[in-house]
Amino acid sequence: MSSEIYFSSNHRDLCEQYGTGAGFQFEFNCQRCYDAWRSPFEAFTTGRAAGWIGKGVSAAWRVLGSEAGTLSNAVDGLAGAGWGHARDAAFQRAITAAEHHFHRCARCTQHVCDQCWNPPQGLCQTCAPDTAAEAEAARRRGLNDQVAERAYAAGQQAGAAYDVSAERQLVCPQCKAETHGGAFCAGCGYKLAAPVTCAGCRQPVPEGAAFCPGCGTRQ
């Protein structure tokens, strides 16, 4: 298996075939933290020549006539013909350079940077985490879990004093803002009252009703 296949899933092609910036460059990413490393830029001289000629065709047309266009097409064709082989060779050189910046984990087969590598174990930090770091993380999780349990217990105690039977208007009937169960609307100051209930059957009575729709008691 060639080394090119190893990096097939974590590289980005930054090459440009034509123009004054024509050249080869590839970006490789750590498959754990996603930090990137870019290979040194290599100019593609034929593509650059095509770019310069393309920019100068309009000006040269008045002097050379159709010969300017013919020359530009010839250079473009030459750049296109040599592009594939030149790019492949540049990619192989980039891979060789990238191998000095990444480590291939024998367990998960991912390529990782130096920061994500555990040298004594020969594995990545995901497969062989740092023991001290894991211990500190576990200690913090234990602390947070204990605090969460105490906070939950405190919430239960506070909840014992909350009147769960009282009905509350959660949306202001005047401005339609959320009230969060308050006595007054925070948006417009409207006094919020619990729905009117029947004195006889204690069921809610629609606003403006003269009699309870449940038992007929006059309101």
Image: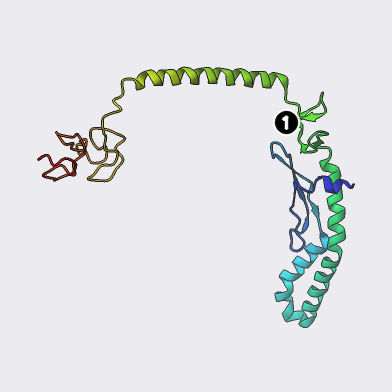
In the rendered image, which residue does mark 1 sit on? Answer: 126
Residue at the outermost front position: 215
User: In the image, what residue occupies the spot 19% across and 34% down?
Assistant: 202
How many other residues sit within 10 Å of disc 1, few (<14), some (14-19) or many (≥20)?
A: some
User: In the image, what residue occupies the spot 78% across and 67% down?
Assistant: 50
Callout count: 1
Q: Is residue 75 visible?
A: yes
From this view, report whether residue 76 is shown above or below residue 146.
below
From this view, report whether residue 128 is shown above or below residue 11.
above
Nearest the viewer among 119 and 176 is 176
Q: Is residue 94 visible?
A: no
Quadrant location, the C terminus: top left
Residue at the outermost right position: 1
Nearest the viewer among 193 and 25 is 193
Residue 61 lies, in percent from the top left, at 73, 79
Residue 136 lies, in percent from the top left, at 64, 19
Left or right placement of residue 151 versus residue 45 in this view: left
User: In the image, what residue occupies the spot 78% across and 36% down?
Assistant: 108
Image quadrant of residue 199?
top left
Image quadrant of residue 98?
top right
From this view, report whether residue 89 is shown above or below residue 72.
above
Image quadrant of residue 156?
top left
Residue 1 lies, in percent from the top left, at 90, 47
**Identity of the amino acid at label 1?**
Thr
